[in-house]
Amino acid sequence: ASYARIGETEPAIKAFITLDEENARRQAAELDKQLKEGGERGLLFGLPAGVKDNIVTEGLLTTCASQFLGNYDPIYDATAVRKLKAAQSVTIGKLNMDEFAMGGSNENSSYYPTRNPWNTDYVPGGSSGGSAASVAAGQVYFSLGSDTGGSIRQPAAYCGIVGLKPTYGLVSRFGLVAFASSLDQIGPLTKNVEDSAYVLQAIAGYDERDSTSANVEIPDYVSALTGDVKGLRIGVPKEYLGEGIDPRVKEAVLKALAVYESLGASWEEISLPHTEYAIATYYLLASSEASSNLARFDGVRYGVRADNPSGLIDLYRKSRSQGFGPEVKRRIMLGTYALSSGYYDAYYLKAQKVRTLIKQDFDQAFGKYDLIIGPTAPTPAFRIGEQVGDPLTMYLNDICTIPVSLAGVPAISVPCGSADGLPIGLQIIGKAFDEPTVLRAAHAFE
Ligand code: GLN
């Protein structure tokens, strides 16, 4: 059924980079056989899943939507993928994205842009745009994405589905091709909140192969969905509903808050005063980490090697010049500059200090409130091509998601309305490792 749906919708949506029907059928047949032999059904038994193409999959190409990794065939599974297999879901294929997860529209894919299933003239968001579009179009039941500064939540909002960025460290990053290691998290994109809880249950947990993996007990996320939000205290940052926010988005968020009130929760306006520095801080830190992480792509160890180099340095230069797209090069240059001696103190170190202040804004708010709620993105999806020549405008789309990433706390995007037929997302942010409350509040609203 999944492949039939892909056959109907994929020519217009282009959510996938790699599809391998034979491999998927083999997995399904194996599950069938185990069941017939009396085996137990796993938590995600038989559910067709898509995986973002920066999460490594044994025997399935993992390109990061880059020409550099066009031929990269991993010899192992990421921990999250291994856990999906253990829960008995079936991997359908690998999903399109912005190259190395750098972007917010899928237009930075070096293959082709994915299109928004609600209106194919519009972007699906990004960088997990293929992951969001595929679920929204009914091609797969759920998908995995990655979120560094909003890449799960923003495409979920643009495509009218549910996207969860877990607390930093809750889901193993082993096998996730690193963009900015202090921010990257894998999480589920699903049709509803209950599915999100199930997939999180399957993928969360300590992994000794990720040095920043949190060694915490994993609660039962599904049983947290009680429908009861009575007495919950919600803070609504004024910075998330001010300048630059589309009035239709603001209206949808205020309506959602009224729903919470009617369910017995209360809300108040609060301030996260360092929000205005979040984008500058993020683009310094994420680019610095990226410049270091992407140094491993040298034309020798992974992926495509340039032809006819005149020597070793020329091999590096040619492979990197040919392999990386323009946005990736921009980030590497920005990050290398921010880390270089003489500038390190003024940029990288300063940004680290501001990150601490941003995190303290959240700590303070969570002293008084159980949840922070606002929009996921300032506007609904924009037209393909509309912001391509303007990276700074593109960067501003992340104003509501980036502070959350810098603070490392969990957040979910759930649909809360639409404008001109394009979905709007509500962002529900929680305390570190308090996914149960985040999921419970999202579920009660949906
Ligand atoms: N859009 C942001 C960026 O371009 C976030 C990307 C992400 O979360 N991977 O960096």
Image (cartoon, helix red, strand yellow):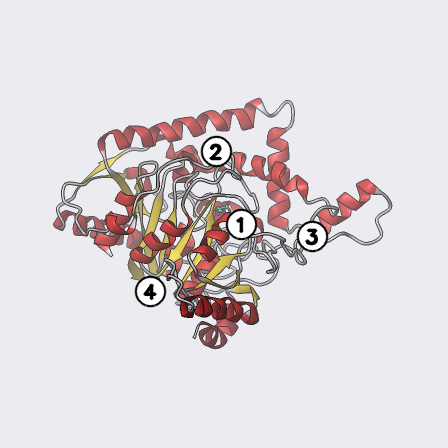
Q: Residue 61's quadrant in the figure?
A: bottom right
**Which residue bears the numbered disc 3?**
303
| Nearer to us in this view, 382 or 136 | 136
**Label 3 to label 1: alpha-carbon separation:** 18 Å
Q: Which of disc 2 and disc 4 is earlier in sequence?
A: 2
Q: Circles 4 and 3: CB distance less than 8 Å?
A: no
Amino acid type indicated by mark 1: Ala
Q: Give the crowd class for mark 3: few <14, some 14-19, many >=20 residues within 10 Å.
A: many
**Which residue bears the numbered disc 2?**
281
Q: Circles 3 and 1: CB distance less than 8 Å?
A: no
Please tell me whether mark 1 sits on a helix, a strand or a loop: loop
Q: Circles 4 and 2: CB distance less than 8 Å?
A: no
Q: Which of disc 2 and disc 3 is earlier in sequence?
A: 2
Q: Is mark 2 within 8 Å of ligand 1?
A: no
Can residue 242 be seen?
A: no
| Nearer to us in this view, 417 or 44 | 44
Location of residue 144 with respect to 23 vertically, above or below: above
Please tell me whether mark 4 sits on a helix, a strand or a loop: loop
Marks 2 and 1: which is nearer the front?
A: 1
Amino acid type indicated by mark 3: Gly
Q: Which of disc 4 and disc 1 is earlier in sequence?
A: 1
The picture places residue 81, in percent across and down from the top left corner, at: 49, 53
The picture places residue 356, in percent across and down from the top left corner, at: 42, 27
Residue that protrudes farthest toward the front in the picture: 37
Q: Is residue 162 left or right of residue 406?
A: left
